[in-house]
Image (cartoon, helix red, strand yellow):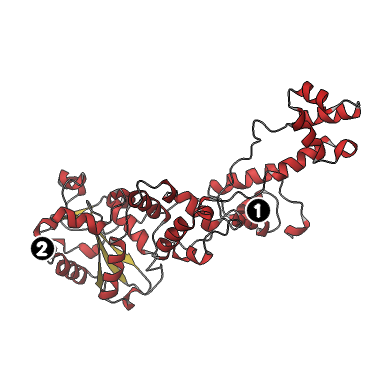
């Protein structure tokens, strides 16, 4: 059991965090540190919210161990505090306080005094949100609306441009949520994060295989330059978001504004998908119907029929290259907060999909300088 083993040494803790930052799981870290179970490793990670604590350093003005040893030798030799201080280049009051708080002349021990000083440095420091109730309330309010910490930080910077007290970094928000010792924000707010995780984890991901042979498919390499550089609106990226029981939702993202549309599709066959997409796209203004970039799934085999119905040319990504639809891939990741993997997506009505799309379109986006997609789209249409 972890409780029967000594605590982690400073070296072991450093290795623990290094392995965690490298993406190793808790079980692998426990084995590497020769722990019989992973509970001890998990407790260290959970207490710090998965965020590696900053390396500890002594303040330049703090007494060093060798200075404390010199004080101890001076006391043993019967020297005065003033004389010991002169030999160290310190003020007499510094040496007097050091001796007084660590047992006096009769009980002073250099190593014990140094250990106490190191321990005193662990006293919790109040974080920014703890000392600014108004700022804390704003952050909690936006978290409850399922804004990400980065969106909150960017929005505050824009909304309170002249008020430095209403600024906070996204990292501070994460730390206030994840680090147990702070207790500044209610832990229930963690459930509003997109991933609903209890701690920070090393970033990673997997890419889907782009499969399916599409007849007369036009490569993304032939897409107009104006779509590539997002110079004008009306160029879209699309894909199917998959759920349990072979259910799907079609997702469309406008490249310039990141405006999102979600479309209910009863099945994945190409006639159904193309018909549902065409029905929604035909409702768009002409200036928003320029092109659509899709993955290589067979659901878009009838892409020519889609183009005839909407006037929108379809371009296809290279095989196994989802990054070529980066805006759509990112949006599908955001949507997993509302449509978890394995969930039967057929239970959601089009009205509910519209509600979720509206929620995303009214969130500030970092890539838009923390403007909302809905506002940006409204501006380009004026």
Quadrant showing the N terminus: bottom right
The image quadrant that residue 194 belongs to is bottom left
Sequence-earlier tag: 2 or 1: 1
Nearest the camera: 87 or 320? 87
Using the image, tell me which numbered label, if any, was put on residue 30: 1
Q: Left of 142 or right of it: where is 107? A: right
Please, what secondary structure does the residue beneath circle 2 have?
helix
Residue 44, compared with residue 284, is above or below; it is above
Q: Is residue 164 left or right of residue 360?
A: right
Say the numbered circle drawn on residue 163.
none
Residue 335 lies in what quarter of the image?
Answer: bottom left
Tell me residue 159's x, y (percent): 33, 52
Would you name the residue on which mark 2 appears?
A: 310
Q: Quadrant of the C terminus?
A: bottom left
Give coordinates of residue 261: x percent, y percent. Answer: 24, 64
Q: Nearer the viewer, residue 64 or 39?
A: 64
**273 left or right, relative to 131:** left
Q: CA distance from mark 2 to mark 1?
A: 57 Å
Q: How many marks?
A: 2
**Is residue 82 in sight in this rendering?**
yes
Residue 301 placed where, x, y %?
19, 63
Residue drawn 23% across the image and 57% down it:
375
Crowding at mark 2 (Cα within 10 Å: few <14, some 14-19, many 20+): many
Q: Could you tell me which residue is drawn at 49 percent across and 58 percent down?
A: 133
Contact, mark 2 vs mark 1 (Cβ under 8 Å): no
Secondary structure of residue under mark 1: helix
């Amino acid at each position: 059991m972890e409780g029967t083993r000594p605590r982690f040494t400073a070296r072991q803790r450093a290795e623990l965090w290094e392995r965690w930052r490298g993406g190793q799981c808790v079980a692998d870290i426990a084995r590497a540190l020769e722990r019989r179970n992973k509970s001890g490793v998990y407790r260290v990670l959970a207490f710090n919210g998965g965020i590696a604590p900053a390396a500890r350093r002594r303040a330049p003005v703090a007494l060093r161990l060798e200075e404390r040893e010199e004080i101890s030798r001076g006391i043993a030799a019967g020297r005065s505090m003033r004389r010991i201080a002169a030999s160290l280049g310190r003020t007499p009051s510094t040496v007097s306080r050091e001796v007084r708080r660590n047992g006096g002349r009769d009980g002073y021990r250099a190593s014990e005094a140094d250990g106490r000083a190191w321990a005193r440095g662990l006293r919790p420091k109040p974080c920014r949100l703890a000392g600014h109730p108004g700022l804390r309330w704003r952050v909690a309010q936006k978290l409850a609306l399922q804004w990400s910490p980065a969106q909150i930080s960017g929005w505050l910077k824009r909304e309170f441009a002249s008020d430095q007290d209403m600024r906070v970094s996204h990292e501070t928000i994460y730390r206030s949520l994840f680090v147990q010792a702070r207790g500044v924000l209610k832990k229930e707010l963690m459930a509003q994060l997109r991933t609903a995780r209890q701690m920070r984890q090393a970033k990673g991901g997997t890419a889907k295989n782009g499969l399916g042979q599409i007849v007369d498919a036009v490569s993304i390499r032939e897409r107009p330059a104006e779509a590539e550089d997002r110079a004008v609106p009306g160029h879209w990226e699309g894909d199917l978001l998959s759920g349990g029981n072979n259910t799907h939702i079609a997702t469309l993202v406008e490249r310039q504004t990141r405006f999102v549309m979600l479309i209910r599709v009863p099945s994945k066959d190409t006639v159904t998908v193309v018909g549902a997409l065409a029905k929604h796209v035909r409702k768009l203004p002409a200036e928003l119907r320029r092109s659509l970039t899709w993955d290589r799934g067979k659901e878009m085999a009838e892409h020519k029929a889609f183009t005839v119905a909407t006037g929108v040319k379809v371009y296809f990504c290279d095989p196994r290259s989802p990054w070529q639809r980066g805006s759509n891939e990112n949006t599908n990741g955001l949507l997993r907060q509302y449509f978890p993997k394995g969930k039967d997506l057929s239970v959601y009505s089009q009205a509910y999909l519209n509600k979720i799309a509206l929620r995303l379109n009214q969130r500030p986006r970092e890539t838009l300088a923390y403007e909302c997609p809905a506002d940006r789209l409204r501006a380009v249409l004026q």
